[in-house]
Image: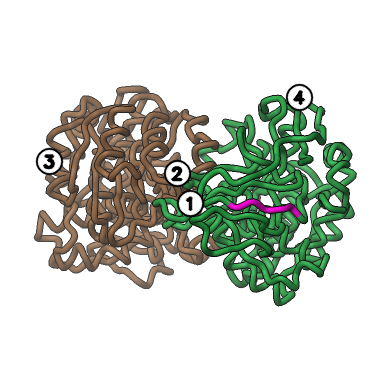
Chain colours: A brown, B green
Amino acid sequence: MRAATIHGPYDVRVENVPDARLSEPGDAVVQVLRSCVCGTDLWAYRGESPRRPGQRLGHEFLGTVTDTGPEVTAIRPGDLVLAPFAWSDGRCAACADGLPTSCVNGGLWGAVGADGAQGEAVRVPYADATLVRLPSHAASDDRLLNALLALSDVMGTGYHGAVSADVRPGAAVAIIGDGAVGLCAVLAARMLGAEQIIALGHHPARLDLARSFGATAVVTRRGEAAVAALRELTGGHGTHATIEAVGTRESMRAALDVTRPGGAIGWVGAPHGNTDALDPMTLFLHNISLRGGLAPTRRYIDDLLPHVLDGTLDPSPVFDTSLSLESVPAAYQAMDARTALKPLITPGG
Amino acid sequence: MRAATIHGPYDVRVENVPDARLSEPGDAVVQVLRSCVCGTDLWAYRGESPRRPGQRLGHEFLGTVTDTGPEVTAIRPGDLVLAPFAWSDGRCAACADGLPTSCVNGGLWGAVGADGAQGEAVRVPYADATLVRLPSHAASDDRLLNALLALSDVMGTGYHGAVSADVRPGAAVAIIGDGAVGLCAVLAARMLGAEQIIALGHHPARLDLARSFGATAVVTRRGEAAVAALRELTGGHGTHATIEAVGTRESMRAALDVTRPGGAIGWVGAPHGNTDALDPMTLFLHNISLRGGLAPTRRYIDDLLPHVLDGTLDPSPVFDTSLSLESVPAAYQAMDARTALKPLITPGG
């Protein structure tokens, strides 16, 4: 089969790889209908996260089940299914606690030895626990398919940010970052009843999308000027809840500085290299809570799927580009150059 | 009047200072019946926290009102009152949010220009909001007075750790630190229904007290051995809730390593100098929440006072030494040498 692989910084290829096939009795094989490229894929692309030459890429997909192992009971060939960005066994202590991303038998698509989502098909371990069946009518609805694909990672991650920041009805909320996760966090903050939703970012088109998603204000300034603008918008008090959806030292500093005493930061911008970004004195003196992390999107799919199916939640506009599997290298180039917000990959397209 | 002052590292004196007296219309003057020495006082003593020569000391006290300004309505001369470790105006946004330690007009006893608790009397700003009236019968009950004094800081701070760590019925809880705050956190974890309460420390007498306060196990090992022991006690899973009551890099590392994925650290060990103690990758990958900070003990007095008055909560055993005001320098020496857990100071004694 064909799949995207990485061979070094800025060296993404689409190659012939061994076909995805059953290996364990709980496995399924899924033919990919939709995948996409994530901001964290860029770390591998830029050489910031190490990868072995030939390692697969992509961790977001939905598709059609083509084969199931003898222990699989919840899904069957022909089913339309959605995968979260990590597989999980559904029965360990972490899974029971609602934290499948910490599953003792879990893993991420594209890890060494695993298929990536940017390919024709994927072997899915623990298929019963990992995959979520979708109504078959969705397969013929492009917009709905795209909205469902967002539940694999970015919509669930944005929601995790909002839940972790304890967004409540009436809250003043800041969202640091106008990438796909930040934009989905705007949708989540609106769902949870926030009164003020202030998006911080630097890309006019993305901030327009933030407004259409429910942002009540946008701030395009940087650093201290951004913090000052945000404080002014909140009557000088700062925000009750801040969603950090970038992961740099600067974005965490902004989150610490705009959150009011007793407020909370919902942290979903994966940190890389910024080991001293968490200023202890600010957190401690102001009783600012820091919550979040790798989002348990498998769990959130159960919460969010009904809203996507009934049309009240539609993250599909985060996909601003659509490319075939053979064009995955171009998708990475566009993400890296920030000319694409989030490229959709359609293996059959 | 007489009061403790500091003139440099290890140079604590008891001197004549100007009498405490009314300055603003909302002030009260309180004659101190009980004060004590706190672990954080040692930072000033050891020169780790800068102080101006002659600055006052001590932030925990209860006593008798001797004078009130014209705007004070809730208390009157003769009342027995308890003070939290910080004053607050009771009407700003932070006070309304239940976070009086972030009051815009607030401050700490012993700050430059303010009286300290280790003295004969204290001028109390915003007396109506800051002070809590106690029943007059308590004045003749030494044990009860000591228990009430603990609400000024250490009991409220330990409780803040347990609340911030989201201790719930049935939880496995670790408490890092066997100082007075850690011991009070044991009491708080028991109050909140924890099933396992594991105290980490190194002082046999303090750990005996932890057991009498409700600890179900104690761990005296250090570093990785302590973490291993704690994991074993929790069936390999780690704790749901961990209370960090020390404030060093090592104690925070232990807290990060013993908390299970999705668990929470209740952080009440004030950080000093350890700006890189908060390992972002551990927090993020395991979705460990970090909550807490400077404890809003004024608020917690309202919650905890009934339990102290009815005898179901008794932190008084944390005071293992009693000294007169003139002996404050000896109290600091004993705290510094760890021969005293928490010295009580009785100005009239």
Same chain check for tags 2 and 4: yes
Q: Distance between the residues labelled 4 and 3?
A: 58 Å
Asked whether A103 or B343 is in front, the reply is B343
Residue carrying label 2: B104
Residue carrying label 1: B89
Q: Which residue is drawn at 56% across and 47% down?
A: B293
Q: Residue at x 23, y 68 (%)?
A: A306
Q: Which of marks 3 and 2 is in front?
A: 2
Q: Which of marks 1 and 4 is nearer the N terminus?
A: 4
What SS does tag 3 mark? helix
Magenta residues? B28-32
Q: Do the residues labelled 2 and 4 touch (CB within 8 Å)?
A: no
Amino acid type, callout 3: Asp
Q: Which residue is drawn at 51% across and 52% down?
A: B26
Dominant secondary-structure state across the stretch colored magenta: strand
What crowding class fits label 2: few (fewer than 14 Cα within 10 Å), some (14-19), or many (20 or more)? some
Which quadrant of the figure has residue A36?
A: top left
Asked whether B79 or A272 is in front, the reply is B79
Q: Distance between the residues labelled 2 and 4?
A: 30 Å
- The spot of residue A197 in percent (x, y) is 24, 49
Amino acid type, callout 1: Asp
What SS does tag 4 mark? strand
Amino acid type, callout 2: Val
Residue carrying label 4: B8
